[in-house]
Amino acid sequence: MTAPAAKPTACLALADGTIFMGHGFGATGEVVAELVFNTAMTGYQEIMTDPSYASQIVTFTFPHIGNTGVTEQDDESADPVASGIVVKWDPTEPSNWRSTARLQEWMQRRGRLGMGGVDTRRLTRAIRQQGSPHVVLAHDPAGEFDIPALIARARAWKGLVGLDLAREVSTRQSYRWQQGMWEWPGEFAPLTEPNPFKVVAIDYGAKRNILRSLVAIGADVTVLPATATTEDILAHNPEGVFLSNGPGDPEATGEYAVPMIRDLLDRDMPIFGVCLGHQMLALALGARTVKMSHGHHGANHPVRETKTGKVEITSMNHGFAVDSQTLPEGVAETHVSLFDGSNCGLAVTGRPVFSVQYHPEASPGPQDSNYLFARFASAMRERRDGV
């Protein structure tokens, strides 16, 4: 006699009425969010703790998620920010010498929902064809789900357009960051530069490895909240300002961030932006941003530098993009996605101001994009030397 199939303990309800059933893990309950797919084969912990994933549920195209466990050293923020994850295979027992806990337990402690046993290829095709849907992910060990209510909740959610999430994930007070890159056999290098550059990093949802990358070029980093004013920044006498990654609609965040950035532009300050910081800089310069159909999320995105033709393999995580057609005179498009031709970088002609849409600190290339941090250091060095 055939044993009865195990009752599903997780449900993913899309706003169009499509239902996926599977096996729940991590925390229990319900969460509504935007669903995106990520094509990275590694880095699930870094993805979950990346503040840019606020109000998003991530489905991974790679089937083996959780098989290397978790370690606090790989957290990109204090807690997971992604609302949940959807995977093909249920997470297995971890097999990695750095692992300190199972993914399932880590998610349960941190209040994040997971779902396994899903045809993630079918789910990814739906996202690519129809755009990132609004969904509800529910985990109930008893397997009791009110399907119509879940669909109704997904349909009622307003989504990310017009939503300022940077303020929610940003630090509440300033702090100094002096931890460098991870080094064998498992320690983070300290700041050793005898005369470090004073850098203010505006935290729209900054990943820790971005701050470590700044330390690696000799920066003494002070992190300020997303709502920092020009006066707050100048009080630290910075030699350069970094605009970090972050979540949400850039135009919503720009309501308070753009006036500050325009003030800095008037002072000829070296400025380097990444991801949301790239979009904030573009808005301050007079360009516009648009919502993408399903965004770019992964560690295998080819980007071409327009000046040299060099192609970088990059890590990306964004659902909005800068409209290159709106870049004003004096602002050059420096990088372009080879997937869809969308804007991936800009620079102000003749000034130490530039930004990229992708994440140079994530090292998928692995070092294709390190030159960007070096460029920022050179800009600050030239300003210090009066060049």
Image (spheres, rainbow, N blue to C red):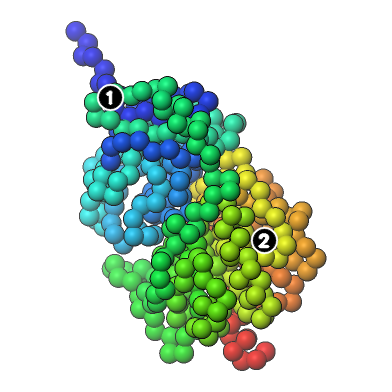
Q: Is residue 99 above or below residue 91?
A: below
Residue at image mark 1: 143
Residue in the image at 50% along x and 48% along y? 298
> For numbered disc 1, what is the local secondary structure?
loop
The residues tagged by marks 2 and 1 sit, at their Cα atoms, a distance apart of 47 Å
Label 1 crowd bin: few (<14), some (14–19), many (20+), radius 10 Å? some
Residue at image mark 2: 283
Residue 180, percent across and down?
Answer: 39, 73
Residue 277, percent across and down?
Answer: 57, 63
Amino acid type of the residue that numbered disc 1 sits on in the rendered structure = Gly
Residue in the image at 41% along x and 66% along y? 172
The number of callouts visible is: 2
Residue in the image at 39% along x and 22% along y? 147
Q: Is residue 245 visible?
A: yes
For the C terminus, which image quadrant? bottom right
Asked which quadrant contains residue 251, the reply is bottom right
Q: Is residue 370 visible?
A: no
Residue 376, percent across and down?
Answer: 58, 75
Amino acid type of the residue that numbered disc 2 sits on in the rendered structure = Leu
Q: Is residue 293 above or below residue 361?
A: above
Q: Which mark is residue 269?
A: none
Does residue 172 appear to the left or right of 245 in the view shown?
left
